[in-house]
Image: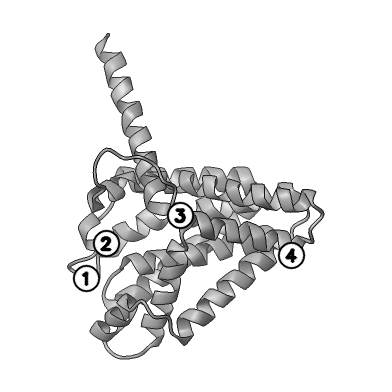
Amino acid sequence: MTDAWLSTEAWLRGVAGDLRIGLLFATRLPLPHPSPIGGSDIARASWSLPVVGMLIGLLGALVYWIAFRFSLPPLVGAALAVTATLAVTGCLHEDGLADTFDGFGGGGGRDRKLEIMRDSRIGTYGACALMMSLVLRVGALASLAGPGRVALALIAAHAGARALMPLFLRLVPPARSDGLAADAGRPPPSSVLLAAVLGFVLLLWSLGTARSLVALLLLLVVLGVMRRLCLRQIGGQTGDAAGALEQINEIVVLLTAAASRV
């Protein structure tokens, strides 16, 4: 074998390994992995999150298509599609959304907010945030006409929502000295750039030029607001805050896909 072939083979193994890590981190799929996954592995593989998001969106689209074939109402199909994405991700980001809203809304100082965010119990702020997240996502999907548009919207939402997460983790330092965010450190610039490019390509393919540009602008606004909030509220980011960012991003993209005047 030539050195070029060996180099290409090693690169392909690295890509496949990063995709497996991305799937193991962001979903509950029982994939084999030869060794335990560390925080640095997740940071390096963060470029794969938009690709994982695309696969999650495709699963939701399949469930919606099945519901459509059985002539179920659009609202029911949309609810089942969102339920499928919840099941495959294990409500990972929903948990982060609830914890973040409870912490930021619960009052007290930085340490108290971080303590609330680590509490497994859900409070009023978190419950309301979860309710609004589900209502907005299901409602946006139900407003789209047919499985084709729903599939494209789900792909755009789940890929676009995760595309800027590495950038967020790069820009905002960890709020704690322990935990996954601190263990992972900041994703390398190459992973941040590749995730952003992959996410925008999938947005462009799914939503078209006008809607993808609007979605990108809104995603950047959300990123800036979340960065400022995290720094002011808890002095940095946590895994929960990153999950909240994903949820808000997902809602923004779905609403953009459903907007008739964009």
Q: Nearer the viewer, residue 197 or 251?
A: 251
Q: Horizontally, is 240 left or right of 204 in the view?
A: left
| Distance from the alpha carbon under mark 3 to that under mark 2 | 16 Å
Q: Nearer the viewer, mark 1 or mark 4?
A: 4
Q: Quadrant of residue 45?
A: top left
Q: Which numbered dot is residue 176? A: 1
Crowding around mark 4 (Cα neighbors within 10 Å: few <14, some 14 to 19, many 20+) is some
Q: Of marks 2 and 4, which one's residue comes earlier in the chain? A: 4
Looking at the picture, which amino acid does disc 3 mark?
A: Arg
Q: Report, in whole angstroms, how far the alpha carbon at label 4 lies from the one at label 3.
A: 25 Å
Mark 2–mark 4 Cα distance, whole angstroms, equals 37 Å
Q: Secondary structure at mark 1?
A: loop
Q: CA distance from mark 1 to mark 4?
A: 41 Å
Task: Identify residue for label 2.
Answer: 181
Proximity of marks 1 and 2: CB atoms separated by less than 8 Å: yes
Q: Position of residue 207 (x, y in %)?
A: 64, 49
Q: CA distance from mark 1 to mark 2?
A: 8 Å
Which amino acid type is shown beneath numbered disc 1? Arg
Depicted 66 relative to depicted 232: above or below: above
Which tag, 3 or 1, sits closer to the chain's start?
A: 3
Q: Check disc 3: other Cα within 10 Å, few if <14, some if 14-19, many if 20+.
A: many
Say if 99 sits above or below 257 in the image: below
- In the rendering, which numbered label is found on residue 162? 3
Query: Dot 1 surroundings within 10 Å: few (below 14), some, or many (20 or more)?
Result: some
Can residue 262 be seen by looking at this rendering? no
